[in-house]
Amino acid sequence: MAGTANLNLGDKSVDFATTQGSEGEKAILIKPFRQATGYVALDPGFVNTASCESSITFINGEEGVLHYRGYPIADLVENTSFLEVAHLLIEGHLPTQEEYEGFKNSITYHTLLHENLKRLFELVPTDAHPMSVLSAAVSALATFYQDSLDPMNEDQVRLSIHRLIGKLPTIAAFHYKRSRGQAYIYPDNRLDYAANFMKMMFGFHTEPYEVDEEVARILDQLLILHADHEQNCSTTAVRVVGSSQANLYASVTSGICALSGPLHGGANQAVLEMLQTIHDDGGDVQKFVELARDKTSGFRLMGFGHRVYKAYDPRAHFLQQKVEVVLRKLKVNDPLLNIARKLEEVALSDSYFKDRNLYPNVDFYSGIIYRALGIPVNMFTVMFALGRLPGWIAQWKENLEKGYPICRPRQIYTGETMRKVIPMSER
Ligand code: ACO
């Protein structure tokens, strides 16, 4: 419901329009703020700033709610596939059978990489971080596919979308193979999205690769859980870069770079490393909870806390329930799961974590599942990127379709005021 907010600043009284989203979130439209008052809003980290209106994803952090286009995440993860969710996010609706076949066929058609792009994997060090290689390869796609760079051309945008979704798993798997000194396994277009990825990762030319359908489905569900999360750091990066009308490949590259940080997507790798450290140290979780409570230690419990969720992250909730089933199915006995369970139990009953509403986030259990699937720890964030891709695309597209202006925040300057250069000989 539209309304008005009144602000008294000194001797000025100014009215601002307000707006309300379909789930009741309220906002003050501050665009005319500076012109009307001479002030700007100062909000480092965009803690209380809505950067856009969006009809893609809804989160209620207080109640642990996550919807894609109005559908609860638990419903989607149980009853749809990753490509259906990708269609939902990007096109705005769940596909009919016919739409699904068209979408899937086009993505499958684009799974191959240009043969020259393979040389990139041969040029980078074999121990390069897979996220650095992923961002370099996605950026390079713009050089190979110059026929799909115009963000204002609907056909070119569709082509770049299908190419990206088709090629990202191939890029990830090719670098993995290269880093292991193994031959590339080319995409198998008879397989579903997750199954094809598994074959490219774990198949060999010497023997047939039998995809375990149940395991492929688990991977597909993990991708769904990560598919979008409204205006997080990487999505904001994609929107900001896209607002300059940079092409989709360039915009998604910025999302991959943002996701690589340990406070964002890199946290799933950091969680596993932390659990391993606790394990190697003898498994005393209380000691590490104490360390996390101590602000001078610089140590945080990785996989705990979230900017938006101040309740249990619904994605973590699904994974927490699923992790044992997955490990049983894969016949994996992972001592890190026991450490994770104990850590969660101790932290959730600790006043420091309770007072700050710090709960496990999506990264807390996803790493244990990826590890059981055979995915190396340094590729966990790549898995996150494969899942998040449709969300980045949908948000990039929405930003352009709404005709939003280029993102260009202001600042409050706190540096030196007018100075005069002193010649070097006199400094
Ligand atoms: N361990 C210990 N203390 C924590 C943790 C943690 N994991 N997370 C937050 N806190 C504390 C902070 O020190 C702060 O305490 P204070 O109020 O006494 O100063 C309070 O909780 C609030 O934390 P902020 O850092 O202000 O919260 P913010 O919203 O800025 O940060 C973040 C959220 C970055 C996710 C943070 O919780 C964190 O660093 N978590 C660990 C890394 C992680 O798991 N990241 C993955 C996020 S989910 C994702 O990207 C998919």
Image (spheres, rainbow, N blue to C red):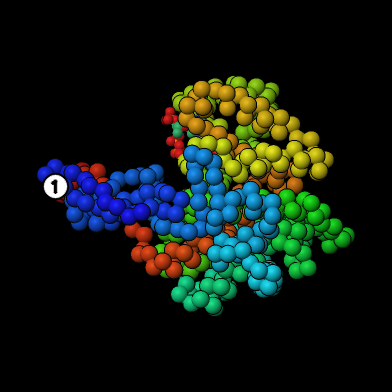
Q: To which quarter of the image does residue 405 belong?
A: bottom left
Residue sitting at the far left? 11
- What residue occupies the far front of the structure in this picture? 1
Vertical relation: 344 (above or below) 156: above
> Farthest residue toward the right?
207
Of residues 192 and 245, which is closer to you in this image? 192
Looking at the picture, tell me which residue is in the foreground, 66 or 343: 66
Going 74% across and 66% down the picture, which residue do you hit?
187
Circle 1 crowding by C-alpha within 10 Å: few under 14, some 14–19, many from 20 = few
- Across and down, in percent, residue 196 comes to 75, 61
Residue 419 in the figure: left or right of residue 290: left
Q: Position of residue 250 (x, y in %)?
A: 50, 64
Q: Residue at 41% of width from left, 64% of height from top?
A: 243
Q: In which quarter of the image is residue 216?
A: bottom right
Query: Would you name the residue on which mark 1 appears?
Result: 12
Instruction: Give residue 177's quadrant in the image.
Output: bottom right
Report helix, strand or loop for mark 1: strand
Say which quadrant the C terminus sits in: top left
The image position of residue 393, as x and y in percent, is 53, 63
Q: Is residue 377 above or below residue 69?
A: above
Disc 1 residue type (three-letter): Lys
What is the number of callouts on the image? 1
Question: Looking at the picture, how far across and down is residue 259, in whole percent?
Answer: 53, 50
